Structures are given as structure tokens and as C-alpha cells.
Image: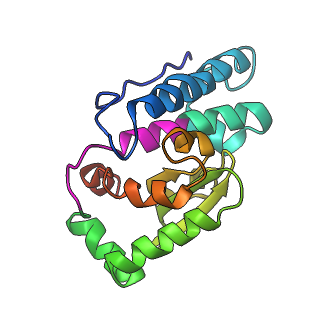
Amino acid sequence: MKFELPELPYKLNALEPAISAKTLEFHYGKHHQTYVTNLNNLIPGTKFENESLEKMINEAEGPIFNNAAQVWNHTFYFSGLHPAVNSAPLEHVAEAINGSFGSLKEFKEAFIKSATSLFGSGWVWLIKNPKGTLEIVQESNAGNPLRNGLKPILTCDVWEHAYYLDYQNRRLDYLNAFWDIIDWDVVEKRF
């Protein structure tokens, strides 16, 4: 199976000022594309040649896992963003956030703390666990909660290439801006 870079559901400048068109040109257009290209070059002749990204995330190791997970992670991340659709979680997610964290404010604080304390590069995920409650999970590098049987509903990319052109080393500023571009409609559907 040949993978392709999925189209963004918005224009490159649609997320400004939170994320600039220049950042998306590099992050989406170069980094995401590189993971797609690398994966397409790695899987021919392997048992993963005609498999889904999810199967590779759950079963592959090394470069195939890393590239498959990064294709999936980036696709999930970019598709969960949108310019100011809804400024707060919708019905079911809002209820689950309140039930799991106490309030939206407490959830944001916990999510940001998790994202700022993740050493190096990786992802911070809001997941729905098998009990149906929400948790925040840190994953280093290409880590993905699917590998642990968890259901992701939101993620924030905290690799430097996600924010360095706009924020340099100010990860916290990027994280604060992230809340302005979450597509809560998408998060509600994932829930």
C-alpha cells in the first residue's frame, strides 16, 4: 500500500497567529511528507507492505514503527486543528473533562504541565481509557497510545519543529496558543 500526504482541512495561513504559514510549510510540507516518503521506501518486501498504519504502530519496531507512527500522529494532529471553530469542548467531551479533571481550567493546566515537562521531543495526548474516562499521556519521540490499547482524542506535537519558527524555545507560548486552534468538533467525534 502506498501512503500519501493527506491534504490539510484548511489553508496554510488559516491557523495564524497561533501557527504561521511558514511553520506549516515546514512542519506539514517537509516533516510530515518526509515520514510518508520514508515509510513508502521502508515497507516494500516486508510483512507491512499492504498493512494499515495502525497495524504497523501496534506491531512494527524501529524505522517502520517510527515513520508509520509519525505519519499517523501528524495526520491526527493536523486534522484536529482549525481556526476558531469552537473555543471550548462540546457536550460529551466537556462532560468527560469535568468528570476526569474537575474543570476545563484544571484540564488545561494538567495538559500544559505534561507538555512542558516532557523531556526532549514527543507528543502529549488526551486519551479515552478502557474505563471511558480521560487521561493525559506523554509519549516520547514517535510514541502513540494506540500501542497501549488507548483511544486518542486530542494531541499536541511538542517536537521543536512544531513551534520553533514561531516561538523558538518558548514551548509554553506555543502551548498557550494551541488552545485557540483546537477543533473541538473533531475531538467530540473522536470521543
Which one is in front, 32 or 172? 172
Which one is in front, 57 or 35? 35
- Furthest residue toward right: 62
Against 40, residue 152 (above or below) is below
Q: Is residue 14 left or right of residue 169?
A: left
Q: Is residue 86 left or right of residue 31?
A: left
Residue 115 image offset from top left, x and y in percent: 56, 63
Residue 28 image offset from top left, x and y in percent: 48, 29
Q: At 72% across and 25% down in the image, what residue appears?
A: 47
Q: At 55% across and 71% down in the image, what residue appears?
A: 113
Q: Quadrant of the C terminus?
A: bottom left
Magenta stretch in the rendered image: 72-87
Against 15, residue 118 (above or below) is below
Is residue 49 among what the camera can see?
Answer: no
Q: At 20% across and 55% down in the image, what residue appears?
A: 86
Against 70, residue 176 (above or below) is below
Residue 124 image offset from top left, x and y in percent: 55, 58
Image color mode: rainbow
Q: Quadrant of the N terminus?
A: top right
Is residue 97 among what the camera can see?
Answer: yes
Against 169, residue 32 (above or below) is above
Q: Is residue 29 magenta?
A: no
**Corner quadrant of residue 89:** bottom left
